[in-house]
Amino acid sequence: MIAIALTVWPPIARLARAETLTFRQADFVVAAELQGAGMGRILLRHIVPLCAPSIIIRLTLNMSSIILTAAGLGFLGLGAQPPMPEWGAMAASGRQYLLDAWWLTTVPGIAILVVSLAFNLLGDGLRDIMDPRNA
């Protein structure tokens, strides 16, 4: 999970930085500076609430790839170790019984599919709700 986290956060950090840079010279930020607000207050009260929806949407849309990566690593034996349940490891352990007990591999695969699809639909729904251009 640490390896996945290290590879997933840079695009999200770039998105947050780009969003922050677009709001840096906005009129409401300049007005808050003229009223004497510090940079921390401007960041927390004005910029973060505007950047949070796009970051949350990006995270929910990336969750399916994170789940697939974790399941792939588990299938190869590089994920969580045997006492902990993991869908990829379950699919790998059922692989040797595929002809006799197909459900041992199919059920974890369907679970991965359903959860990935659910996160994609959640991200799509959040984008429809939170996108200011749809108003």
Image (cartoon, rainbow, N blue to C red):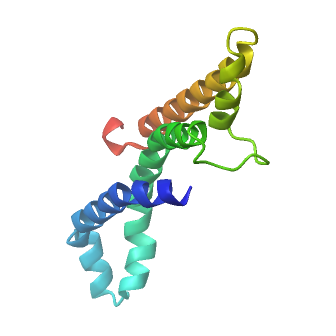
Q: Say if 41 sits above or below 95 in the image.
A: below
Query: Split into 4 quadrants, where in the image is the N terminus?
Result: bottom right
User: Is residue 84 positioned above or below 91 on the image?
Assistant: below
Query: 10 or 40, which lies in front?
Result: 10
> Taking 81 as reference, is 55 left or right?
left
Number of marks:
0
Looking at the image, which is closer to me, 15 or 114?
Answer: 114
Could you tell me which quadrant the C terminus lies in?
top left
Going 66% across and 35% down the picture, which residue do you hit? 87
Q: Nearer the viewer, residue 132 or 111?
A: 111
Q: Position of residue 116 (x, y in %)?
A: 55, 32
Q: In which quarter of the image is residue 107?
A: top right
On the image, the x and y values in percent for residue 42 come to 38, 78
Q: Which residue is drawn at 53% across and 60% down?
A: 2
Please give the name of the residue rendered at 60% of the width and 43% of the height, measured from the top-left corner: 77
Q: Residue at x 53, y 37 (%)?
A: 72
Question: In the displayed image of the protein, which residue is found farthest to the top?
Answer: 99
Which quadrant of the view contains residue 41? bottom left
